[in-house]
Amino acid sequence: MVLPYSSCQFGGVWGVQYEGLYTDRFTYHPGEMINVHCSLKSGARVPFMFVRIDVRPEEVPLWLWATPQDFGNPNPGPEGALFPVSVSVPADAFEPGVYKVSMPPEAMLPENRLNVGNGFPSDNSVAFFVVTPAVAGSTSRILWVHDSLTGVAYGGFGDQSIYPSANGSARTVSYLRPGLDRAATWSHGNVAFLRGHGYEFEFADLVDLAFAPPGHLDAYDLVCFVGQFEYMPNEVMSHLAAFQAGGGNLFVASHEFGIFRVRLDPMVGSMTTYKWDDVKDDPYWNSGPFTQLPLVAGVGMRAPASPWETEIIGQTVWPAHRISIGEFVSFSVYNLDEAGWIVEGTGIGAGDAFPGAIAEYVSGLCVEYDGGQPRPILVDDMRLPEGLVIWGARPSSDGLDWRAVPGTPTWQWPPLAGGHGTATYQQRSSGAQVVTLPSPTMCEWTVGVGYPAYDRMLLNIFARLSVRA
């Protein structure tokens, strides 16, 4: 079913310099229409290819053809691209899963194919979304969360980004524009692996989850975050805290989970973050009413009224930061009396290490050793959950002290002694269990490709966490 559509949307003009495509949301349910917005200067008739990317081999369930119009917003950075809808298709046409839609990049002018102004190239010819059942928990008690906002932050469409670009650094950018692909496609290969072992999934993205009603996650036994997840709405963190309090389990494999808070405006489709300038510049902190404090958009580890990432997942990027440069390093296991079930059957035991497990940026903790076993320090400063177990660790020389003077950029934060990349396990009084890995690499690039220890580790985790205690 193809529904061509065009309109002069408010704020748009004919003949803008920009081209590309995007979808009108990141999560779709049966009964909703997937609207692909597109603008091309050529007036050519082009194919739109829908690809399911959470299966192996990838599937192409649908091709559609349309003739996009040359229409849009001359200021798309903060306000959105305002491209017309070129094709629409019912979400019912797709099985639940993770998808991308693309058009041939050569349909655009060469200068419009990639955004390169902020140093993080992104592709304007592709967009990503998930499809999931209308009723939460109706087909699976496991929710896989899609990182829709890291791409929004890094995107530079319209020469506007929260990272330095031609127009400086913006506080607010639109998530209704092309070029939001960074990190959105990572970390789905293990879905196909797990599905091959009997696990099924429902899906949601961060924007959809942020505006879900209270108790939405109670439909699930396990919620999974595998990927970057650097930019996190307070609403998602609050949903997770309530989910844990009710006994829900979490599996997190992320190097930068929730390190910056963002606030979303669904009326215009925008995301705002002040990063390390939050205390100084965010009006929600320094001049707004008390009720706005949960929506302060800055460093997660000093958020005034939002759960810290350490309170939820037990660790954060700052103690470890960049543990290596361009090299995968091993990761030793510890405290197997308390967390040995995670490595059972892997062939890796006390004093051993997972080879080639992690690289570049990883999350972790400040650590001291007691009888050869790592224990967390700065427990109060980091608001760590009681009984947190470190079952994997590697020292890092690149830890950063997040307690630096507000307004100081992260590259000027002082060093942090005792920093390690870590893997942790929690069992809370509610019955909730949490397993956190230092980065996605430890369960993504290593799983299902001939490294049986990693396969077994991931299956052990899902066997335990997929059902509430």
Image (cartoon, rainbow, N blue to C red):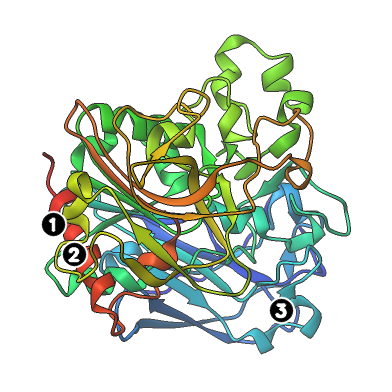
In the figure, 167 relative to 244: above or below?
below
Residue plotted at (16% across, 64% down): 199
Position of residue 245 in the picture relative to residue 320 (left or right): left
Answer whether labels 1 and 2 touch (C-beta < 8 Å). yes
In the image, farthest residue toward the top: 290
For image coordinates 43% across by 51% down, the residue present is 422
Q: Is residue 52 visible?
A: yes
Horizontal side, residue 189 vs residue 206: left or right: left
Q: Earlier in the sequence, mark 3 or mark 1?
A: 3
Give the residue at mark 2.
Answer: 459
Instruction: Sort mark 1 into few (<14), some (14-19) or many (20+) by Cα contacts within 10 Å.
Output: few
Q: Which mark is residue 463?
A: 1
Q: CA distance from mark 2 to mark 3?
A: 40 Å
> Helix or strand or loop: what does disc 2 sit on?
helix
| Residue identified by numbered label 3 | 113
Residue 274 visible in the displayed image:
no
Is 218 located above or below residue 186 in the figure?
Answer: above
- Please name whichever residue, 402 or 131, is drawn nearer the observer in this view of the structure: 402
Give amino acid for label 3.
Arg
